Amino acid sequence: MSGVPRPDAVEVGPPDAAASVIWLHGLGADGWDFHPIVPELGLPAGLAVRFVFPHAPHRAVTLNGGMTMRAWYDIAALDLDARSHDAAGIRASEALVRGFVEREIARGVAPGRIVLAGFSQGGALAIHAALRAPWRLAGAIALSCYLLLPGELESARSEAGAGLPFFMAHGTADPVVPYAAGELARDALRAVGYPVEWKSYPIPHGVSPQEIADVGVWLAQRLG
């Protein structure tokens, strides 16, 4: 399925969409990375969902020797130590994501028909932004990722998003983001009352056909 490029995103779907999925890519990728999965989700033809795949800003990434690439925030090390999280970069990208939600609302999509989604670094940001959104969204999808700024989980989450449903998945052979990091994020969300549908797959850092199908089923349930 071809995508329509914008300066800040790739879009797939009808102009008169009744629902939207804002999908955030991983470190070093861009908005074109996940747009081919749209037809593989198997969503009902009449659902009228617009997929928005934003491009992260270019920034220097410490983990990669300071090389400049598309990244939602800086990453200092693969250990995912919360003390090394780039709080300023995370908050700046949270504001970008909120802007994409606001744009969908301005185009006529109700907040309760909008899903935030992402993979790896983008999945971590999707969780972060969904928890803090001032609207009641339809839910969030977080694949192969972890929890950002976990010390803020209790204090920073919005009242509007109480009980927001999550779909989370992780590869059991992931050498980039440890499977245990995904489990910790899942457990932290469940501990404060968020319903999390959790799936695991025998894959490395990526997505599998079964995972894409499972995401499609969850989306159809949330947006159908």
Image (cartoon, rainbow, N blue to C red):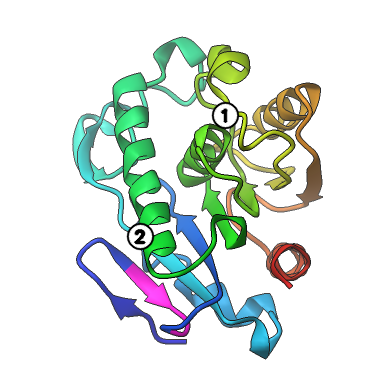
Crowding near the residue tagged with mark 1, few <14, some 14–19, many ≥20 C-alpha atoms within 10 Å: some
Q: Is residue 74 visible?
A: no
| 83 in relation to 60, above or below | above
Specify the quadrant of the image occupied by residue 4.
bottom left
Residue in front for this viewpoint, 28 or 112: 112
In the picture, the disc for residue 103 is: 2
Residue at the (67%, 29%) spot, across then down:
185
In the rendered image, which quarter is residue 91 located in? top left
* Span of residues in magenta: 10-14
Callout 1: SS = loop
Residue 36 location (% of width, % of height): 49, 76
Q: Marks 1 and 2, Cα distance to the nearest angstrom? A: 20 Å
**Does 169 sit left or right of 142 as displayed?**
right
In this view, 191 is above or below 43: above
Q: Is residue 5 left or right of residue 179?
A: left
Q: What is the x, y in percent for residue 122?
A: 46, 45
Q: Amino acid at mark 1?
A: Ser
Residue depicted at x 42% and y 66%: 52
- Residue identified by numbered label 1: 158
Residue 166 lies in quadrant: top right
Q: Residue at x 39, y 47 (%)?
A: 97
Near mark 2 (Cα within 10 A), the count class, few <14, some 14-19 or many ≥20, is few
Q: Is residue 34 visible?
A: yes
Q: Nearer the viewer, residue 206 or 222?
A: 222
Q: Is residue 56 left or right of residue 175?
A: left
- Measured as percent of width and height from the top left, residue 77 is found at 41, 22
What x and y, as percent, mark residue 38? Answer: 56, 76
